Amino acid sequence: MEKQSEMQNREKAHSAERLDSKGSGKCQGDDSRGSGKQRDDAVWRQLAQAALDARKMAYVPYSRYAVGAALLTEQGGIYQGGNIENASYGATNCAERTAIFKAVSEGERRFSAIAIAGGMEGAEPVDYAYPCGICRQVMQEFAGEDFVVIVVKSDSDYRVHGLRELLPYGFGGDSIR
């Protein structure tokens, strides 16, 4: 019970955390292609670190592949999520959707970016972890034109993509209205 309360307090603190403009990072890749946003290395670096930290919250007893995501709201709040596995693999939830669903369940609807870091539990990421198709579709539901997806190896080694680059013909609410 004490551990659960400590975790809830940590989650609330992360939810309320606001980005500052300190620091710098080196970006690999093209952050403007498909996104229309100017690169902000300080913000991307901080979001990358939040995704790396979120990997520690992953529940991965089967694959041991821990993924963390950090979702940036338009107001500067950060919601973190880890992947949550289940013995019935279909019930597993990805880190990206965990972060998005957490934010949406707390009333957030407008997001600017998401950073994703993945790798074997207890080890640093050795490759970039891109979102699966289902996560891309969920991002599409809440993303604006300039939504950015950042795939992370470290807080100084990441790639920045526009969602439209990763999901060029996305199906969204406009498709059914």
Image (cartoon, rainbow, N blue to C red):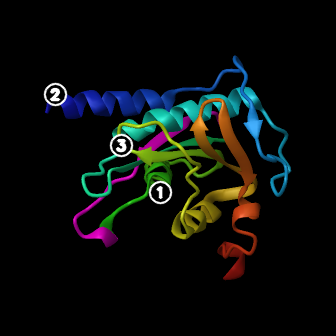
Q: For mark 2, give the secondary structure.
A: helix
In space, the residues marked 1 and 3 are separated at their CA atoms by: 19 Å
In space, the residues marked 1 and 2 are separated at their CA atoms by: 26 Å
Q: Nearer the viewer, residue 75 or 112?
A: 112
Name the front one of labels 2 and 3.
3
Of label 1 and label 2, which has the lower sequence position?
Answer: 2
Count neighbours of disc 3 (C-alpha within 10 A) and say few if under 14, some if 14 to 19, many if 20 or more: some
Image quadrant where one finds the C terminus:
bottom right
**Whole-percent x, y for residue 169 in the image:** 74, 75
Q: For mark 3, give the secondary structure.
A: loop
Q: Is 15 covered by the magenta stretch? A: no
**Whole-percent x, y for residue 56 in the image:** 37, 36
Question: Amino acid type of disc 3?
Answer: Glu
Image quadrant where one finds the N terminus:
top left
In space, the residues marked 2 and 3 are separated at their CA atoms by: 24 Å
Q: Is residue 72 visible?
A: yes
Q: Which mark is residue 171?
A: none
Of label 1 and label 3, which has the lower sequence position?
Answer: 1
Count neighbours of disc 2 (C-alpha within 10 A) and say few if under 14, some if 14 to 19, many if 20 or more: few
Image point (26%, 27%), residue name: 6
Q: Nearer the viewer, residue 136 or 56?
A: 56
Label 1 belongs to which residue?
97
Question: Amino acid type of disc 1?
Answer: Arg
Count neighbours of disc 1 (C-alpha within 10 A) and say few if under 14, some if 14 to 19, many if 20 or more: many
Label 3 belongs to which residue?
121
Of label 2 and label 3, which has the lower sequence position?
Answer: 2
Q: Is residue 99 left or right of residue 170?
A: left
Q: Which mark is residue 2?
A: 2
Image point (40%, 31%), residue name: 12
Q: For mark 1, give the secondary structure.
A: helix
Q: Nearer the viewer, residue 150 or 126?
A: 126
Instruction: Tell which residue pokes out farthest to the top in this image.
Output: 22
